[in-house]
Amino acid sequence: MKEIVNAMSLPTDPMWPRAGEWIVTAGKGSAPSGDLALLGIPAHATSITPTGAHATPSAVRDALLRYSTWAAGHGVDIATLSALDFGDVTDPDGADGIARVAAAVGRTKGCRLLIALGGDNSITYSTMLGLAGGDLSGWGLVTVDAHHDLRDGESNGSPVRRLIEAGLPGSHIVQIGIADFSNSPAYAARAREYGITVSHRSELNRRALKEVAASALKVAGAGDRPVFVDIDVDVCDRAEVPGCPASAPGGISADELRRLAYLLARDPRVAGLDITEVDATADAPDGRTVRLAALLVLEAAAGLAMRR
């Protein structure tokens, strides 16, 4: 049985504010302004592997109640940021769903950083398209993912290919964490043909994460163009993210992913970030995958706070 977490079921301490209570519900009127926007996009219908990822945005919001707003390692309280929750997009799958996502993303444009909670990885296409206003030619993309996501068709395995076909130059894309035995020669060749810069999982063993992030942003954000970041949690080791259907043993650690979320979100060129491929209905009893997704929200917020 899924554990329901709410503020009433947790201890109360006025000197220990909860992150889940820091984010306030956005109004329904004209697009409000703020620092951080949270938007749930519970897409799941076109997933290659059947998934309950549509349950994840609400589960992540629950998990945020378990954490505070104080990032001790950075010496920053993210509660100094204004954070608005724009709720969930209704039925975000399919052509009509993409239009609904675009409209919802449009309401967040008064905020400095959008964090989109998936849902499966198909939301990278609809979210970035909405954030760019349909013109992707002047944008960059960084994916942190075990997979190229260059498949044919329309699924959680095709968002990068669809973005390229919609006008995003392949030379503006960097992929971090591409894993062995998780792709194919055909899609690796497709990535080369598109001009995508690829950092394989093995490279992360040899290079500092700070250097990896900086190199990715140098390519994706060249000329100070805005950048979108796609975080597919299945880049992590399967023991740490059992709620990710396609995760495999030997992926990066939860700590490495948290640090990448912080490092990438700290850059002012990053306008949006998504967190995808967490199936809250398939998580371990301790909720470790959903809790990691919540911590990625907080790490990205810390990066935003440190831009100052």
Image: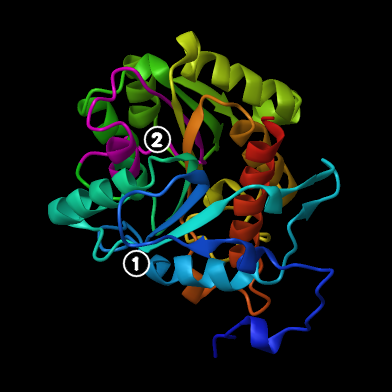
Quarter the C terminus occupies: top right
Colour scheme used in the picture? rainbow
Contact between marks 2 and 1 (CB within 8 A): the answer is: no
Q: Is residue 48 above or below residue 3?
A: above
Q: Is residue 20 above or below residue 210?
A: below
Q: Is residue 252 visible?
A: no
Q: Which quadrant of the view contains residue 243?
A: bottom right
Task: State the residue lying farthest toward the top.
Answer: 223
Q: Mark 2 or mark 1: name the one nearer the start of the chain.
A: 1
Residue drawn at (46%, 27%) of the image: 227
Residue drawn at (29%, 25%) of the image: 136
Closer-to-camera residue (105/173)? 105
Q: Amino acid at mark 2?
A: Ser
Relative to residue 199, is residue 96 drawn left or right?
left
Q: Where residue 224 sits: x, y (%)?
A: 48, 14
Q: Is residue 228 above or below residue 24?
A: above
10 Å crowding of disc 2: few (<14), some (14-19), many (20+): few
Q: Amino acid at mark 1?
A: Pro
The magenta stretch is 126-152
Tag 2 residue: 184
Task: State the residue lying farthest toward the left.
Answer: 96
Tag 1 residue: 50
Let me know if residue 148 is in the magenta part.
Answer: yes
Q: Which quadrant of the view contains residue 69?
A: bottom right
10 Å crowding of disc 1: few (<14), some (14-19), many (20+): few
State the separation of the CA atoms marked 2 and 1: 21 Å
Q: Is residue 34 visible?
A: yes
